[in-house]
């Protein structure tokens, strides 16, 4: 295939995939007594070239997610971002915080008090309040960052004291599970924690966003109560690192 036709095929695939995903989101939302409008749908654009991201935006995507600060800042000028929110979803190093504050709509991957304090400090410096989600390592995996479930409620309460951030909810990436029942259990545990923390009515904390569900499991996540899914490879195809 020529490069042109390869691009055109990929554009068509993206449009087709987005349509299929939207239908699955709507079905899962309805199964849990909600509608598609209740679910925030993020296109995860890490490693994806700007022309394909812009095509997804042309097809109606209004929220994108990137994992790395440098990649996000590099791509940003080339993206058609009018009316599109962009969130950081990958582990954030403290020394990169100053670069990202003010450049994104939300930081979903706040995985330590240290990084939360630095986001607060840099936000105050810029006269901003940064929306954040608290990341929970629901599967207690060594390889993952995030608060262990036992520590998360206290961490949220402690973070609530920090000036310059607004805690909007929780985010999680559960373990890869062949066993769907086990996977659903992780999602249910996240949902219960989200509800319990919300019920505490902590000042400066609103549990409005429960960010969980990716390409392989967004329907299960929605049925368990997620209202914010992060989908990458199902839209853009497999990533080659
Ligand atoms: C890459 C990534 C996703 C999307 O993963 P897919 O399986 O490609 O949908 C979602 N969330 C986070 C935090 C990611 O790093």
Image (cartoon, rainbow, N blue to C red):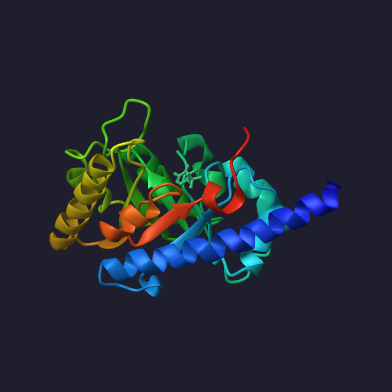
Left or right: residue 132 compared with residue 139: right
**Where is residue 141 drawn, in percent x and y?**
31, 29
**Where is residue 80 drawn, in percent x and y?**
68, 64
Left or right: residue 238 compared with residue 32: right
Q: Is residue 226 visible?
A: yes
Residue nearer the viewer, 74 or 176: 176
* In the image, farthest residue toward the front: 1
Picture quadrant where residue 207 is located: bottom left
What residue do we see at 46% from left, 39% from top? 92
Residue nearer the viewer, 108 or 93: 108
Picture quadrant where residue 62 is located: bottom right
Residue nearer the viewer, 88 or 142: 142
60 lies above or below 180 = below
* In the image, farthest residue toward the top: 142
Q: Is residue 163 visible?
A: no
Quadrant where the C terminus is found in the figure:
top right
139 lies above or below 51 = above
* In the image, farthest residue toward the right: 2
Counting labels gives 0
**Where is residue 51 drawn, in percent x and y?**
73, 55
Residue nearer the viewer, 35 or 155: 35
69 lies above or below 56 = above
What residue do we see at 26% from left, 53% from top? 160
């Amino acid at each position: 295939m020529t490069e042109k036709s390869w691009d055109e095929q990929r554009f068509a695939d993206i449009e087709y995939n987005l349509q299929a995903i939207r239908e699955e989101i709507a079905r899962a939302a309805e199964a849990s007594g909600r509608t598609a409008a209740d679910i925030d749908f993020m296109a995860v654009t890490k490693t994806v070239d700007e022309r394909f991201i812009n095509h997804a935006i042309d097809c109606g995507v209004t929220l994108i997610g990137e994992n790395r600060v440098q990649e996000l800042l590099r791509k940003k000028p080339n993206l058609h971002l009018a009316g599109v929110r962009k969130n950081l979803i990958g582990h954030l190093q403290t020394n990169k915080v100053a670069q990202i504050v003010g450049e994104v709509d939300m930081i979903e991957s706040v995985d330590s008090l240290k990084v939360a304090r630095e986001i607060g400090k840099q936000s105050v410096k810029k006269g901003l309040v940064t929306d954040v989600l608290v990341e929970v390592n629901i599967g207690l995996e060594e390889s993952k960052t995030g608060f262990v479930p036992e520590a998360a409620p206290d961490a949220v309460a402690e973070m609530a004291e920090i000036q310059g951030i607004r805690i909007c909810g929780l985010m999680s990436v559960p373990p890869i599970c062949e066993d769907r029942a086990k996977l659903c259990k992780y999602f249910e545990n996240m949902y219960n924690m989200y509800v319990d923390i919300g019920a505490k009515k902590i000042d400066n904390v609103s549990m409005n966003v429960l960010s969980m569900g990716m390409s392989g499991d967004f329907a299960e996540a929605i049925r368990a109560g997620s209202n914010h899914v992060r989908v990458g490879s199902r839209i853009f195809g497999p990533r080659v690192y």
